[in-house]
Image (spheres, rainbow, N blue to C red):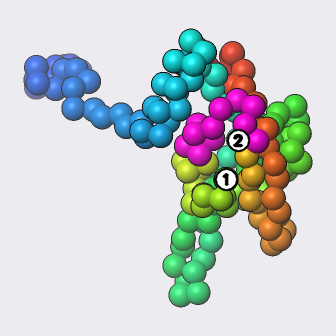
Amino acid sequence: MNVGEVLEPPDEMAGPEGIGYAIPIEVVDRITAEIIETGDVEHPFIGVRMQSHFGQADDGAVIPGGALIVSVEEVSAAGEAGMLENDIVVAIGGKPIANQSDLALAVRLYRVGDVVTFTVLRDGETHAFDVVMGQRPADQQG
């Protein structure tokens, strides 16, 4: 092989074959029902940036501890409900949230306009917020 020589992958590795994308059936069911009912689909949006939050077990182990809200858009479903930066979402609709992926999936299970209770830790205290699911802005569709 010469320096700078570009090697081509073998034909069996040339395309995206073998890459899997999983969409939970609950999301597929919601979207399918909405398309059948209205002919279109609106994607729910709460208007936060988030990251996974980790806690510590009694034995010192690091454990998932919810989804930390890094920022909240002022004019958004979460902002209008009273959620703030540094809140930690630990449940949505009574279902536990272990990390940011759980939060993103949980939001997708609902429709725009649904009222959903978010359970949040703020300064060590538990709070409940009824969030009216907003619609994802057109510039963030995808």
Residue that carries the numbered disc 1 in the rendered image: 93
Find residue 61 and report its horizontal and vertical position in percent: 52, 79
What residue is rendered at 76% in x and 60% in y? Answer: 120
The disc placed on residue 105 is none
Which image quadrant for residue 81?
top right
Q: Position of residue 17 (x, y in %)?
A: 21, 26
Q: Quadrant of the C terminus?
A: top right
Residue 80 location, quadrant: top right
Q: Which residues are magenta?
A: 105-115
Taking 81 as reference, is 10 left or right? left
Q: Which residue is nearer to you in this view: 28 or 55?
A: 28
Q: Is residue 125 magenta?
A: no
Q: Is residue 28 visible?
A: yes
**137 to the left or right of 72:** left
From what the image shows, is residue 61 above or below residue 127? below
Q: Nearer the viewer, residue 19 or 14?
A: 19
Give the structural element (helix, strand or loop) at label 2.
Answer: strand
Circle 2 is placed at which residue position? 49
Which residue shows up at 83% across the image and 63% down it?
A: 127
